[in-house]
Image: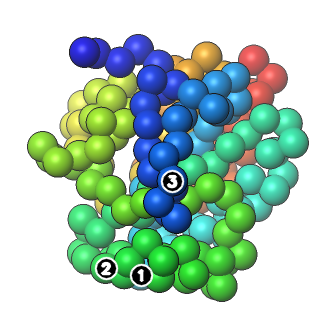
Amino acid sequence: MSHQNIGEFDAVSIDGKKVKLSRYQGQVMLIVNTASACGFTPQFGGLEKLWKAYQDKGLVVLGFPSNEFGGQDPGSNEEIASFCQMNYGVSFPMMAKIQVNGSGAHPLYQWLTAEAPGLLGTKAIKWNFTKFLIGRDGQVIKRYAPQDAPEKLAADIEAALAA
C-alpha cells in the first residue's frame, strides 16, 4: 500500500506507547532523526527553541533516535530520553529508537525519503539530524541536511504555519 499522507503512519513513543501520527493532522511537523553523541547533538537545543516558539501556532517537533550513524545513539530509549531532557531540556515528543535506512527502515522514513530525496536524488538518510518539514496537509514540504541549523528553518516553518 502506498501512503499518501503522514497521518497514515504510526510510531512508538520513547516510553513505549503507540502514537498515531494522525493526531498531529492539521499541524506543521518537523521530523528529525536524532542521536545523543553526534557533532550535531547540540541541535536539540535549537529544535527545542523552535518547538517553544511555534507550538502554540501549530508546530510539532518529533525526534526519532537512530543508532545507524557511527553508533552515536547506543543507549536504551530510557537513557536517550533522560539525556535529551537533562542536557537540552527537550520537551517535544521523542519516539522510540528506529532504523531510518535500508530494508529495516521504519515505514515513515521509507515514505519521507521517497517523497523528498536528498542531494542528487539519493533516498538514504546520510547522517543524524536530517530534518523533514511537513505541511498542515500532511505532505512533505522540504528536506534539510544535518548541518542545517534549526534556527535557519524558522522562515520556512512560519510560511508553512501561515499556509
Q: Which residue is mark 3?
A: 17
The mark tally for this picture is 3
Residue 154 horizontal/vertical position (percent):
73, 45
Q: In this figure, which colouring scheme has been used for the structure?
A: rainbow
Q: Which residue is mark 2?
A: 74
Above or below: residue 89 compared with residue 135: below
Q: Amino acid at mark 2?
A: Pro
Q: Crowding near pointer 2: few (<14 within 10 Å), some, many (20+)?
A: some
Residue 94 horizontal/vertical position (percent):
55, 59
Task: Identify the residue shown where x is 85% and y is 36%.
Answer: 57
Q: Residue furthest right?
A: 56
CA–CA distance in space, label 1 to label 3: 25 Å
CA–CA distance in space, label 3 to label 2: 21 Å
Task: Identify the residue shown where x is 36% and y is 24%.
Answer: 115
Q: Nearer the viewer, mark 2 or mark 1?
A: 2
CA–CA distance in space, label 2 to label 1: 9 Å
The quadrant in which residue 151 appears is bottom right
Which type of secondary structure does the marked residue at label 2 adopt?
Answer: loop
The quadrant in which residue 26 appears is top right
* In contact (CB < 8 Å): disc 2 and disc 1: yes
Quarter in which the C terminus is drawn: top right
Query: Is 42 placed left or right of 160 in the picture?
Result: left
Q: Amino acid at mark 1?
A: Ala
